[in-house]
Image (spheres, rainbow, N blue to C red):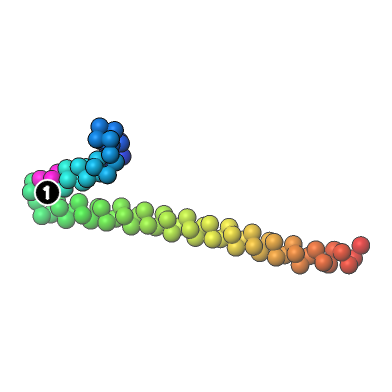
Amino acid sequence: MSSKFLLARMAILCHDANMAESYASQFARKGGQARAKILTPEQRSESARKAVEARWAKQKKLVAAITEGTKKLLKKARAKKRSQRQAPNQQRNP
């Protein structure tokens, strides 16, 4: 089950989203500590490396989306500028 689903379910049972979030973080902390005890240092290192790579991948996607959006906005602005420059020329030449 996803964490969002669990939080929603706990919020319904507790009738309080903040309380549900608090419980969820407490259980996650306990689960993380238990997992850390089981894993070898190499496995913990590998897991941490994968987590960092996943975070950076999300960051790269976000930067790419922002860059693409900025390029589209610049292209629209340039086209608008061109059309404004051409409009006075068209009025003079009829």
Residue drawn at (15%, 53%), measured in percent from left and top?
Answer: 44
Seen from the viewer's position, the closer of residues 50 and 6 is: 6
Spot occupied by residue 58 in the image (x, y as percentages of width and height): 36, 53
Q: Residue at x 23, y 56 (%)?
A: 49
Query: Is residue 62 found left or right of 8 in the rendered image?
Result: right
Residue placed at 29% from the left, 41% from the top?
A: 17
Secondary structure predominantly adopted by residues drawn in magenta = helix
92 in relation to 36, above or below: below
Relative placement, left or right, of 57 versus 48 is right
Quadrant of the frame with the N terminus: top left
Q: Quadrant location of the C terminus? A: bottom right
Specify the segment rendered in magenta: 30-34
The secondary structure type at the circle numbered 1 is helix
Question: Viewed as shown, does residue 11 lie left or right of 36?
Answer: right
Does the stretch in magenta take in 33?
A: yes
Label 1 environment density (alpha carbons within 10 Å; few <14, some 14–19, many ≥20)? few
Residue located beneath label 1 in the image: 33
